[in-house]
Amino acid sequence: MTIDIDRARRDTPGIEHVAHLNNAGGALRPSVVTDTVVAHLRREAEIGPYEAEAESHARVSGVYDSVARLIGAQPDEIALVQSATAAWNVAFSSIPLQAGQRVLTARTEYISNAIALLQACERTGATLEVIEDDEHGQVDLDQLERRLDSDVALVALTHVPTGGGVVNPAESVGALTRKAGVPFLLDACQSVGQLDVDVDALGCDLLAATGRKFLRGPRGTGFLYASRAITESLVPPVLGLGAATWTSPTTYEVVPGALRFETWERSVADNLGLGAAVDYALSFGLPAIEERVTGLAARLREDLSQTLGVTVRDKGVRRSGIVTFTVDGMRADEVRARVAAAGVNVSVTRISSAQLDFGARGLTEVVRASPHYYTSDDELDRLLAALR
Ligand SMILES: *Cc1c(COP(=O)(O)O)cnc(C)c1O
């Protein structure tokens, strides 16, 4: 199966304005997403917000079905939240941590997760241990296996980091955590929407993702996957309407399934937009999207490595659609500005958001180019021409 590029570009009005190679920051939306959000906002204005929600009840609950289908889960394993960070936080804070326990993570852990892990360990007396990378620049599986003892409360891993091309071997991590009976929380924020992600194959118990990046959904949307097996043992630290039922003046019951991880109020329009984005991605098929995105990224790495003064910084056996590089003698911000003047969007990742990863690799900043399946070869050429 291959991507119908003409269809993808026809459905993406933003390509008229810019060569958008910042899909890892936020993608250009397909028209169906914008139209879905706007139509619901109009309907709220016409008949009232609650009434508009009731009227579209079937579509609202269909969003859970779509997200579940995207990652090979069941609808009752999905919580819709405001961001990947919100998803990760509510999952992480539901896992009891005690003094003397250990939490394992890797060098590429996302900034907010890393800060929250440090804070939680400071509060509880648990210890955070960072698994080193192997010689390929991905999390070292042998070291992980050796450190997976019964006092490990959690393994937290970022599947695809924000500032590097590696795809961590999450399936192998999942096989190890399953064998050890340790909960596995996967940050799949950069992989969902660009790679064919399946929670059973990954073996994760919890997975956090966002709407606006490779999924091409609205800002302010995200979701948590929590497996049926783990959910009944997890209670979020603060429950409210929707997450629990008030059964008498002095009692409450946590609701079954992943809805316990949600808060009640949400943008229904944006959630419908997320559902439209997922359905749109599924209409191409994630295997085809993955093939196209990783193919474009591989071509870009190859051409960048032939460009004088440019050094590609990506590591890993398997690589994603995120391409990072530096330019000799030029600050990343200057590269971004010059490329922007040529009508190309790229972004910059700094050591301040990758202390463990960049620190170990002697990097302070990189330029990041992240094509998507709707990106054309001409758009990659525009970037390369601007760099030359
Ligand atoms: C962007 C990002 C996040 C945070 O996503 P939000 O939706 O902004 O909360 C988490 N992890 C990774 C790897 C990211 O790139």
Image (cartoon, rainbow, N blue to C red):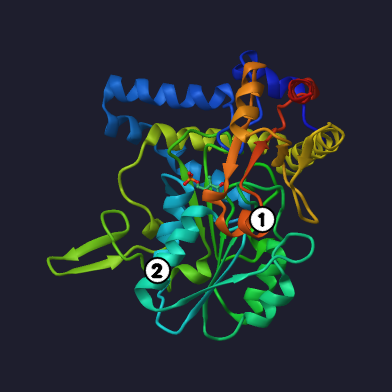
Give the residue pinned by disc 1.
198
Disc marking residue 233: none
Q: Amino acid at mark 1?
A: Asp
Q: Position of residue 16 (x, y in %)?
A: 64, 13
Mark 1: give few (<14), some (14-19) or many (20+) Cα within 10 Å: some
Q: Is residue 52 left or right of residue 78?
A: left
Q: Front-most of 177 and 259?
A: 177
Q: Amino acid at mark 2?
A: Ala
Q: Front-most of 48 and 133?
A: 133
In terms of secondary structure, where does tag 1 sit?
loop
Image vertical order of residue 184 relative to residue 65, above or below: below
Image vertical order of residue 140 relative to residue 18, above or below: below
- Disc 2 CB within 8 Å of nearest ligand 1 atom: no
Q: Position of residue 192 (x, y in %)?
A: 62, 47
- Quarter in which the N terminus is drawn: top right
Q: Front-most of 165 and 192?
A: 165
Q: Is residue 388 left or right of residue 324?
A: right
- Quarter in which the C terminus is drawn: top right
Image vertical order of residue 281 relative to residue 251, above or below: above
Give the residue pinned by disc 2.
120
